[in-house]
Image: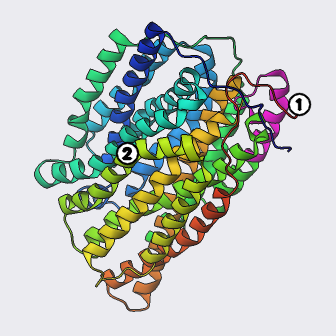
Amino acid sequence: MTDTTYDAIPASPPLDADTASRNKLVIALLLVSTFVVFLNETIMSVAIPHLMKDLGVTASAAQWLTTAFLLTMAVVIPITGFLLQRINTRPIFVLAMSIFTIGTAICAVAPGLELLVFGRVIQATGTAIMMPLLMTTVMTLVPPEGRGKTMGNISIVMSMAPAIGPTIGGFILAHFDWRFMFILVLPIAVGALALGYRKMLNVSTPRYAPLDVLSVILSALAFGGLVYGLSSFGEGASHAGEAPMIPAWVPIVVGVVAMAIFIARQLVLQRQDKALLDLRTFESGTYRAAIILMAVAMMALLGTVILLPIYLQNVLKLDTLQTGLLMLPGGLIMGLMGPVVGRLYDRLGPTLLLVPGTMLVAGVMWALTLVGQDTQVWAILVGHIAMSVGLALVFTPVFTASMGSVRMELYSHASATLGSVQQVAGAAGIALFVAIMTIQTANLTTEGLDQIAALSGGIRLAFFVGAIISLFAVVAAFFVRKPEGGPGMSHGGH
């Protein structure tokens, strides 16, 4: 594919007061609701070890609470490109928050792991619609020269929720039943839904867009097969001696084949503007590099997020509240850096932020390969803060540069593709890290190591794989460029 460039344009004319006020209200409502769904996603991160004991399940089974959430989002997000074109802003917002609220209610009353995972799947369906809706709306309403600042402000909310989520989760688990993680989120979700129902305005222009059912089925098989296959490795290791019902390589092969057919079908359908995911977004070299960087960053980040609480609680013997408090400063710093990074992006472009950011994340990942039973808690705290600073330098530039590098009519497809890759990579990272940890722990136990030493060794190997993966993000950072134009631009090379 050839790179796509845009003709440079002057700054957009200022908006009139009524339009500017309307835009701020719509973005504010979307941000409040995004905060709620992000809080729900991260409140679970410190709960996995607790739920393993409470429900009597293995790490590989418990990880499905996170993996099923991310996997559902990866399957649903491709359809949101279609939904955002067909349905106006207000009804799709109400639909997304209603689904999320129902899923939260199911989780709050779940008696065991099976119904809890089902509730998380329903929650994820609502969350999957909310994320591309926010990204597409911001790109449509905010002129190019102000996007870095707006994305930076968005990252405050997106970072604050993950920052306080583990702390709130730790506090709840220290004093209440785990179901209160959902009981407390439920009234907030209902409030956000009611506020949006009354105040949300329609800002998009719906148009006819066909839904290719075969593409939906293929995307589900592709994303589902890959993540299920990776998860099966972990399950197989934790049940040593038991023959798995389906060998792990089978769903992986199904996923790879389905992905190849899915991509081929999209390339044919996009000629008539009928693709579920229009892959013409990849004509932009910046978009391609940003997708790779996002995938690698999400694999490393979510793999670390799932392993760190297991390490802190099972090896260093911290409780859930201490684990949440330890992860709080890094998240708060990431949130506070959002507006600063956004303004720096508008002034400097992405490269001067992404290169040091990815190097910092990679450096912390390599440092985590040295953790053991004698590692000091303060060292983990410093490492987590450093990684949070690195990620703050990565996410705002990646989102802004990638979305700004495609044509306006492809925004819904660009945000859906970015979201799909983000969630699949995150789910694959979790599955891969847990599988490596479980297999290595089982091997070391067989060799005669005690349980804690074996677990520590398994976690070190998983971090080592993550450290290798993180190096690809450093390379990709050099290829993300700041888009020169904005919405409605003609292609310079076409």
Say above or below: 442 vs 7. below
Main secondary structure type of the part rendered in magenta: helix
Inter-mark Cα distance, 2 to 1: 39 Å
Determine whether, in the image, residue 274 is placed left or right of residue 346: right
Based on the picture, tell me whether residue 276 belongs to the magenta stretch: yes
Which residue occupies 35% across, 35% down? Answer: 35
Upstream in sequence: badge 2 or badge 1: 2
Based on the picture, tell me whether residue 375 belongs to the magenta stretch: no
Which residue occupies 30% across, 16% down? Answer: 195
Residue 57 picture quarter? bottom left
* Between 107 and 56, the one nearer to me in the picture: 107
Determine whether, in the image, residue 3 is placed left or right of residue 77: right
Type of residue at label 1? Answer: His
Q: Helix, strand or loop at disc 2?
A: helix
Question: Nearer the viewer's eye, disc 2 or disc 1?
Answer: 1
Which residue occupies 45% across, 43% down? Answer: 69
Are the two marked residues, 2 and 1, in contact with CB atoms closer than 8 angstroms?
no
Query: Is residue 228 visible in the rendered structure shown here?
Result: no
Range covered by the magenta-colored residues: 258-279
Q: Helix, strand or loop at disc 1?
A: loop
Query: Is residue 182 visible in the rendered structure shown here?
Result: yes
Circle 2 residues within 10 Å: few <14, some 14–19, many ≥20: many
In the rendered image, residue 107, in percent from the top left (x then y), is placed at: 30, 38
Q: Which mark is residue 494?
A: 1
Say above or below: 30 vs 345. above
Residue highlighted by disc 2: 159
Q: Which residue occupies the extreme bottom position in the image? A: 448
In the rendered image, residue 294, in percent from the top left (x then y), is placed at: 58, 51
Q: Quadrant of the C terminus?
A: top right
